[in-house]
Image: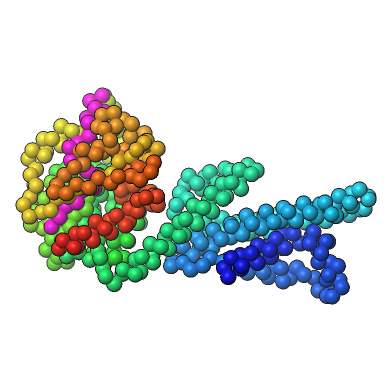
Amino acid sequence: MRYLRRIIYILLLAAMADYIPLWMLVLRPLIQATFSMLPWLPLLAVFLFINLFPLQGTAPTRQIRQLAAGCELLRLFMAAFALSMCVQLLWICLWVLPAIIEGRGGWWRLVLLDGAVVFFSLGILFWSGMIRVYLTSVQLGVKHRVLAAICGWIPFVNLWYLARIIRITGDEVRFETEKWEIDLVRAESGICRTRYPLLLVHGVFFRDFRYLDYWGRVPKELIRNGASVYYGQQQSAASVEEGGRELALRIRQIVEETGCKKVNIIAHSKGGLDSRAAISHWGMAPYVASLTTVNTPHRGCIFAEYLLGRVPEMVQHRVAAAYNAALRMLGDTAPDFLAAVTDLTESACAARNAVTPDAQGVLYESVMSYCKKAQNGRFPLNMTYPVVRHFDGLNDGLVSVESARWGEKYTLLEPKGERGISHADMIDLNRENIHGFDVREFYVGLVADLKRRGY
């Protein structure tokens, strides 16, 4: 039934776009023989109905519904455009060319009028769909939006890229709908409702902003499945010891306000080092049930040490001063760019590991991913990947696989196919649906496993 309706829509759209040739070839003799009313009113009503209520199936949220509607309108545009071109060709062969050969006047007025009708009717259909997908799609990103605007001026290439946009947005609708349905089925089970709340700790050079979540779509997915989620809120650039001190204050605040006694920490990148410092150096061991580090450089980065050794000290201080000034504007009280970078070097991590033993009673686990090639990571990770590979080996664009190994359990995520999993992919920073790796479902599984083991 759905496909039958789609076929009817396409035929009606083509009829609207090709009103003039249809009128000249078919409708005028038929209408003149039976009716005196012009046929454009019902066609216009159908056209408006299709634009306002496109065939889109079922969707769980308003955003996905609008995305599905836009995707369907673009499909209808492609089909109606193809059918319209066929009708136009037929009309030219059966009416326009004979009119030119026979010398009949007035044919050019009908050609211009028909072109205007086709242009505006299909144009409205196209922009109705394109605006919807531009405003609601996450997976198009900036790249596809810009490329679509550029390709739109190139004949035939624009149709090819439009087909690509339809495929991307169609896959997004199906993927998000399936995820929502899965969450709906397991909502009552609360598979992420752990004994202790989750504390998500960000990495270096980022902050926990209210409207720009460092962890992408992950927190909402965890909350939807029963988790209680809090954020570290430490400064974006500081030494590991300072980050640990700030996290210790944050943990005490959460414990006192909620009465939860302990927290489960999930920390990304340098956040894992800050968390270990909070536990071992700032007395947080009694208040932490588990620490799961994600792509954390526990053994440091050789390439960071190399860069610090090569870049002149004057240049380092200039860069640090500019960065610290920008961080103060974003909310950091005492940012220290050089201290943060220095604490990520191999020698600094080795010295700190010697005086930072794992605390008794705290579960330590680690997770790591890697890229197969530079293109797997978006800028700037695609540029840092070969440098890190030269010094540190297999990596995620910043951290090597061996540097991230820590704790009782170490999980190395093996990418499927040619697509790797970068440092940013592990926190859903780009909100990208990666084929073969569902980052949101990964964290649901990770937290569900903590719940299963009583944490």
* Colour basis: rainbow
Q: Quadrant of the N terminus?
A: bottom right
Q: Quadrant of the C terminus?
A: bottom left
Q: In the rendered view, does 98 fall on the left or right side of 190?
A: right
- Is residue 266 visible to us here? yes
Q: In the rendered view, does 376 fall on the left or right side of 72?
A: left
Residue drawn at x 40%, y 50% as measured from the top left: 435
Q: How many marks?
A: 0
Q: Position of residue 449 (x, y in %)?
A: 21, 59
Residue drawn at x 7%, y 55% as measured from the top left: 361
Q: Nearer the viewer, residue 434 or 298?
A: 434
Is 305 inside the magenta-drawn segment?
A: yes
Q: Nearer the viewer, residue 12 or 387?
A: 12
Q: Nearer the viewer, residue 343 or 382?
A: 382
Q: Position of residue 362 (x, y in %)?
A: 10, 54
Residue drawn at x 35%, y 56% as measured from the top left: 217
Q: In the rendered view, does 217 fall on the left or right side of 202?
A: right
Q: In the rendered view, does 348 fall on the left or right side of 391?
A: left
- Is residue 248 visible to us here? no
- Which residues fall within the magenta stretch? 289-310
Residue drawn at x 69%, y 56% as measured from the top left: 83
Q: Nearer the viewer, residue 2 or 302?
A: 2
Q: Position of residue 100 (x, y in %)?
A: 89, 49
Is 260 inside the magenta-drawn segment?
A: no
Q: Position of residue 57 (x, y in %)?
A: 51, 67
Residue 157 occupies quadrant? top right
